[in-house]
């Protein structure tokens, strides 16, 4: 699977409509299977954020819309908003902390982590 499947698009008009001061960049990674998601990301995802592999990471402080589609029992989509908090050269990519995540998406992340033996704290 390719390292960098992300796409970006300007959301200037959306920023004007919603009163946001910062533009958001969309990161969208489609996975053909649950195993592909696990192999690529599970060691780099937590309840609070994700590491996104990219040959062209975004600058620290960039607001991003995240959307990850995976096949679990059914086709599922994890989506939310985050902020780039660090950039790495090896492996190339960026750490993104979740700033907005629906309870449904949080539940999917919990399910992914639980299936791999990670403990999730009780709310």
Image (cartoon, grey):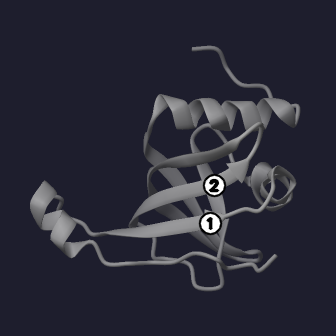
Q: Residue at x 76, y 77 (%)?
A: 90
As helix, strand or loop, the secondary structure at mark 2 comes to strand
Q: Measure the C-alpha gap from mark 1 to mark 2.
A: 7 Å
Q: Residue 120 appears at what percent x and percent y?
A: 71, 25
Q: Residue at x 67, y 42 (%)?
A: 46
**In the depicted view, which residue is nearer to us: 73 or 57?**
73
Tell me if residue 82 comes above or below residue 110 in the rendering: below
Which of the 4 quarters of the picture holds residue 88?
A: bottom right
Q: Residue at x 83, y 60 (%)?
A: 36
Query: Mark 1 = which residue?
Result: 29
Q: Which mark is residue 69?
A: 2
Q: Residue 62 appears at what percent x and percent y?
A: 39, 68
Q: Is residue 43 left or right of residue 10?
A: right
Q: Is residue 74 left or right of residue 49?
A: right
Label 1: few (<14), some or many (≥20) within 10 Å?
A: some
Which of the 4 quarters of the picture holds residue 72?
A: top right
Which of the 4 quarters of the picture holds residue 1?
A: bottom right
Q: Residue 103 appears at what percent x and percent y?
A: 49, 29
Q: Residue furthest top?
A: 123
Q: Residue 26 appears at what percent x and percent y?
A: 44, 68
Give the position of the C terminus as an image quadrant.
top right
Q: Residue furthest front?
A: 74
Label 2: few (<14), some or many (≥20) within 10 Å?
A: some
Nearer the N terminus, badge 1 or badge 2?
1
Q: Which mark is residue 123?
A: none
As helix, strand or loop, the secondary structure at mark 1 comes to strand
Q: Answer yes or no: do the residues labelled 1 and 2 have beta carbons within 8 Å?
A: yes
Q: Is residue 119 left or right of residue 102?
A: right
Tell me if residue 93 comes above or below residue 100 in the rendering: below
Q: Residue at x 50, y 49 (%)?
A: 79
């Amino acid at each position: 699977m390719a390292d960098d499947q992300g796409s970006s698009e300007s959301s200037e008009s959306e920023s004007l409509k919603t009163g946001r001061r910062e533009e958001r960049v969309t990161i969208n990674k489609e996975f053909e299977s649950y195993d592909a998601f696990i192999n690529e990301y599970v060691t780099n995802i937590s309840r609070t954020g994700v590491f996104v592999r990219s040959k062209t990471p975004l600058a620290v402080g960039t607001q991003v819309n995240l959307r990850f589609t995976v096949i679990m029992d059914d086709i599922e989509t994890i989506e939310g908003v985050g902020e780039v908090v660090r950039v790495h050269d090896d492996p190339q990519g960026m750490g993104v902390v979740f700033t907005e995540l629906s309870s449904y998406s949080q539940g999917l992340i919990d399910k992914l982590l639980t299936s791999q033996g990670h403990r999730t704290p009780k709310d």
